[in-house]
Image: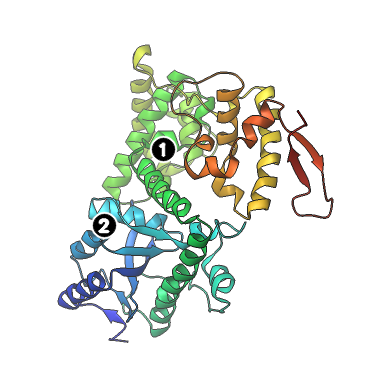
Amino acid sequence: MSSSLISDQSEFENLCDQIRQAGIVAFDTEFISEYRWKPELCLLQFATPERSVCVDPFAVTDLTSWWQIMEDDSTTVVVHGGQAEVRFCFSLGGGRPRKLVDVQIAEGFRSRSYPLGYTALIARVLGEKIHGKETRSDWRRRPLSPQQIEYAIEDVDHLLKVWSTQSAALAGQDRLWWAEAEFDKMISDVHTDIVRESWRKLPGVHRMRPQELAVLRELANWRELEASRRDRPARRILRDDLLVELAKRQPKTVTDVMATRDMNRPEYKRIATELIDCIRAGQDVPERDRPRPPESAAGDQTSDEHVLGQFLSLALTNRCFELNVSKQLVATSADLRHLVRWHVFGEKQGTPPRLTQGWRAVVCGDLLTDVLDGKIWVRVADPESDHPLIFVRPPA
């Protein structure tokens, strides 16, 4: 096991030198997120064309050399469903990955299957069967067992071969740049989520009034500080739904707080006074400084937008079947509504719809806007086909 697990700083530095020389590496992590304020990195796995190895971050405490590799533009880093790995690069390395490949995303441009789990993806691309992940492992315990090391290494062992197959296929279809654009978008989305205020991520914020949002902001900020101080997950300090409920009800006394459903617990009674202080602070925020709900919230759509969005969804589904790409990668319901608002209702403030830009414009072309303009007829061509509809332009 010693050759497969690096627990010495100098060995780790040598590994980083080998990775730089190879110019490409598969990367994965094992972490625990249910006990600490922030996810705890417990293991790093790497595979170059020459070797596969794990690194113990409890023993190798300085990972700077690796984060520098991730943040340069010389080494291709191949991951599968790599949002967590990107997040660690931002939070522990302090920078943005520059040359990252995500094979889960890439497969969505070769087939309609997205997102595929690691085991299914290996079977799909390579036709090989692997054992699967040790999902119940406690990766914090030391020493790690030989079985844990074996399973962890298996998570990176096939990634370079997968990407070699995918990249060749995508290049042949002129879709490699599609995938690269989406890798970059995924990184940007992770960064946006990191810097976004915690209260904006809570469920139901789009249905709350500005004063309620001001209270919610105070409560959420208090919860983050308390979670940081106690090094516990924020939801273990106070659940999301209770946070939202307090912001709506705005109780004035400890008794009122404890009368909130599911708040009648001793640990909540101990913090009730602090919660009331947060509520009062939110209530005192001047009207001009209160946050506003998201403008493009799903709950704000009109019935016309809903119907047109559903119709576009049908057209887009058919188009994705024709091209054999994942609709989930192409557009969300919000993307379709944005196009409807922009093209039909003339709401053209801000950034143009994503469906009119980049590789998405190639997929959709003028199809969706021409459907909205009535320039295309829709009819059933083959009821037994996986894309039974065809979209045709009427004769001049």
Estimate how packed mark 2 is, as few (under 14), some (14 to 19) or many (20 or more) residues with alpha carbons within 10 Å.
some
Q: Position of residue 322 (x, y in %)?
A: 67, 51
In the picture shown, does residue 154 fall above or below 73?
Answer: below
Quadrant of the rendered image containing residue 88:
bottom left
Q: Is residue 357 left or right of residue 23?
A: right
Q: Label 2 sits on what residue type?
A: Asp
Q: Position of residue 1 (x, y in %)?
A: 32, 87
Q: Is residue 337 left or right of residue 239?
A: right
Mark-to-mark CA distance, 2 and 1: 52 Å
- The answer to whether mark 2 and mark 1 are in CB contact below 8 A is no
Q: Which mark is residue 269?
A: 1
Q: Which residue is mark 2?
A: 73
SS under mark 1: helix
Circle nearer the N terminus (2, 1):
2
**Residue closer to the observer: 231 or 289:** 289
Q: Position of residue 377 (x, y in %)?
A: 77, 34
Residue extending farthest left: 10
In the picture shown, does residue 13 fall above or below 341?
Answer: below
SS under mark 2: loop
